[in-house]
Amino acid sequence: MTVDEAARVPVVIVGAGPVGVTAALLLARHGIPSVVLERHRDIYPLPRAVAGDDEIHRILQAAGVGEEFTAISRPAGGLRLLDARHRVMAEFRRSQQGHHGYAQSSMFDQPELERVLRDALAKRPECELRGGVEVTGVGPETAGPVRVTYRDDDGEHHLWADAVLGCDGANSLSREAIGAVWEDLHFEERWTVIDAETTGPVRCWEGVDQVCDPERPGTFMRVNETRYRWEFRLRDGQETVRELIAPWVPPSYDGDFEVVRETQYTFRARLADRWSRGRVFLLGDAAHLTPPFIGQGLCSGLRDAYNLTWKLARVLRQGADERLLGTYESERRPHARHVIRLAVIMGWAMTGGQDGAAAIRRRALAAACRIPGLTERAGRDLSPPLTAGPLVRRGIRRRLAGTHCPQPWVSGDGRRTRLDELLGDSFTILTTAVPSPSLTALAQGLGIRTVSVADLGDDGTLAAWLRGGRADAVLLRPDRVVLDVVPTGGRDFTATAAWASLLHTTRSPNPSPRTAEQSLLRSAAR
């Protein structure tokens, strides 16, 4: 069969939830067109995800909706652990100005976020959303583009894509298509989730309450001015909503109170055993399921999108080495596993579990919370550094590698702006020293810009960060992860050939490709 060029697109994205649409917007910023296929005709109207951190706020900024997300979200104070009598056992505070330039924890309504993302998608000529369609097949694999089959009111259609992103949730057809299966990380509980609207006197604080009661573990949070969420683990016997929420809303209150949604979920901890096959990739719930106890489910999916899209764009648009795409799973899968395990540990510790050791765990948790400084350390960034790999040069003198660069306000083009807006979507060498000739040659060879911290006019955050990491310079990836480090007193990145070969492109952005390639090879050989 001859591929119909009219039906061929660079990227097909299966699923128009927050992860799929964010991926489309990120690809658009790199100039990569995409078609998003979604079975619903409009946004799913009921709330689901309600919490995010400063890292995903930064990702949404990269997707072009940072300020819009600020407008619909509410900074949260952190997490409190309560005992069965609702007495505070511990408090994990979250800063209003985190490492990524935003509040460390925010509450939001998912339908509002999806509307913001859809509105932005509609403004991008590179993106096309096709709603009300059912994807029926992805593949089979061929030597050429991937075939995606879908059905709508007019019948069956085919698209051929250079890459397919499976953002189609826990029951993913894309996961089945690549032959991936779930790895069970041993957590499964049935919970009831209640979302309600009221202007009544709800007893709450500006964060999340976790009730550590093995008989009735629960979670409570205020989402916005009038929206609240409760989650309770199911047990035998029927209880009304008002009975369940009595500790927060007085039973005597007879004013406005609307249950927006009451549903049951099975919270699971699972990880797909493979995240890609050929040019088909899994993102979000198609690749991992995280219990909600640390609010990282959606965050992990958006990290997937940020990690993959710049690599895919570099391969599709600039002819970078195909091996670059292999670093998506090698970086994201261990990271997602860590976050899932942390959520499971926190879940068992906070809810007490359902076995005979529950009381012992609860007492141990209460004792641990009294250790000086523990709650402060536990309240820090929940996203660990990426593990060492081709695009993360870890080592004793590279403690910053695999971490994110902070994002302060800086001066550029005569205005104050956030760092990422100034840097754009490219690689950047951020330095406090005059670059060596070999460093300059490397930057020219790979089309990397070099920025002096002294010229940014920030509040000293970047210089202090580099100094604390004992670095004179760092190489930032487009997702703001530190790839490599020039240690204090050093002159160059070491062993550059290990990663430079992945990034070198057959279509160089520099005016003289031959000169750039020669500079790159000379630098990599040093």
Image (spheres, helix red, strand yellow):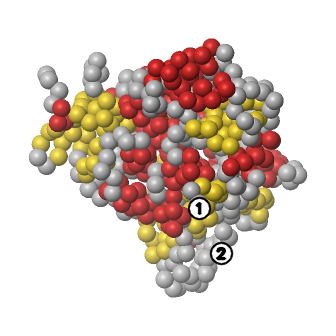
445 relative to 462, above or below: above
Q: Is residue 329 visible?
A: no
Find residue 365 and name its label: none
Q: Which residue is mark 2?
A: 203
> Looking at this view, is 351 or 318 the one in front?
318
Q: Give the secondary structure at mark 2.
A: loop
Residue drawn at x 27%, y 26% is 145
> From the viewer's perspective, is 217 left or right of 503?
right
Q: Is residue 454 visible?
A: yes
Q: Position of residue 39 (x, y in %)?
A: 27, 49
Residue drawn at x 60%, y 55% is 412
Q: Which residue is mark 1?
A: 415
Query: Which quarter of the rendered picture does the N terminus lie within?
Result: top left
Residue farthest along the left direction in this orientation: 154
**Dot 1 or dot 2, earlier in sequence:** 2
Residue drawn at x 44%, y 30% is 511
Q: Position of residue 128 (x, y in %)?
A: 28, 48
287 relative to 29, above or below: above
Q: Position of residue 316 (x, y in %)?
A: 37, 30
Mark 1, residues whose alpha carbon is within 10 Å: few (<14), some, or many (≥20)?
Answer: few
Amino acid type of the residue tagged 2 in the rendering: Arg
Amino acid type of the residue tagged 1 in the rendering: Arg
Q: Give the secondary structure at mark 1.
A: strand
Mark 2, residues whose alpha carbon is within 10 Å: few (<14), some, or many (≥20)?
Answer: few
> Looking at this view, is 163 or 416 the one in front?
416
94 relative to 343, above or below: below
Query: Which quarter of the rendered picture does the C terminus lie within?
Result: top right
Residue farthest along the top direction in this orientation: 525
> Looking at this view, is 33 or 506 the one in front?
506
Gap between marks 1 and 2 measured at Cα: 43 Å
Residue drawn at x 40%, y 26% is 507
